[in-house]
Amino acid sequence: MSSREGFAGWYRHRLVWVAVILLTVAAGVVFLNRAAGGEAEPADLQAQIVARMRTTLEQADPGQHNHAGHNAQQAATEAKPPVICGVRVYGYEPAAAATLADVQKVYGFHLCGIAEQKRPWDVAVKLAGPLIMDMSTEPLGIQVVEATENVRFIDRLHQMFPAKYATLAQEEALAATEMADLRRRYDAAAGL
């Protein structure tokens, strides 16, 4: 009988240890989820800004992108073709903004294609370049960096953008994943 009592005691202790391990793992998961929640906010804000920029640019008339001399060729009776955009956020002000409502200005890049039916991406009318989006107005303000008769593009970029974002704008456009998503959405909109 003593072996049977020993086995029962050992078995009870094993269940206690399993319970202790499960409680420890559960507490660790709760702690990590709470800790990750604070870090996930900026990524979520970044995603919200990207979605708002893309939606604003796609709903705006191409002329509102403030690009000089870029118009889609279309007959007067045809519906306007959709504008499909990819965006990249370089930064925003104030940098300490915690919610989308707190963001006043966004510095970024856009590449948009006017998706005329059966027109491949390679020959589509495109609107592209660094831009500043004023999030404090309704509708949102869109300023595209462009050269003028008297000011070169690079000089205009440095006039409009803070130095750290101007440097990014000279080096980076769309990320590969954003470009792939843009092409997929463009092809669908153009019926390809």
Image: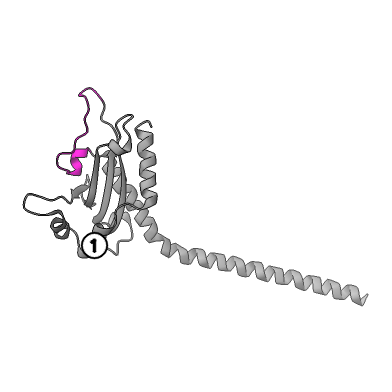
Instruction: Identify whether 71 is placed above or below 2.
Output: above
Asked if residue 14 lies left or right of residue 52, the reply is right
Of all residues shown, which one is farthest toward the top? 77
The amino acid type found where label 1 is placed reads: Thr
Q: Main secondary structure of the magenta part?
A: loop
Q: Nearer the viewer, residue 87 or 72?
A: 72
Residues in magenta, as a range: 61-78
Instruction: Kindly state the secondary structure of the residue where label 1 is placed.
Output: helix
Asked if residue 7 lies left or right of residue 87, the reply is right
Colouring scheme, one of rainbow, by chain, secondary structure, one colour: one colour
Image quarter for residue 155? bottom left
Q: Quadrant of the N terminus?
A: bottom right
Q: Is residue 150 magenta?
A: no
Asked if residue 58 lies left or right of residue 162, the reply is right
Q: Position of residue 90 (x, y in %)?
A: 28, 58
- Residue at 39% across / 60% down in the picture? 41
Instruction: Identify whether 103 is placed above or below 53.
Output: below
- Residue at 65% across / 66% down in the picture? 22
Q: Which residue is mark 1?
A: 167
Q: Nearer the viewer, residue 64 or 84?
A: 84
Q: Position of residue 60 (x, y in %)?
A: 24, 40
Q: Quadrant of the C terminus?
A: top left
Q: Is residue 71 magenta?
A: yes
Q: Position of residue 142 (x, y in %)?
A: 20, 48
Q: Position of residue 133 (x, y in %)?
A: 23, 51
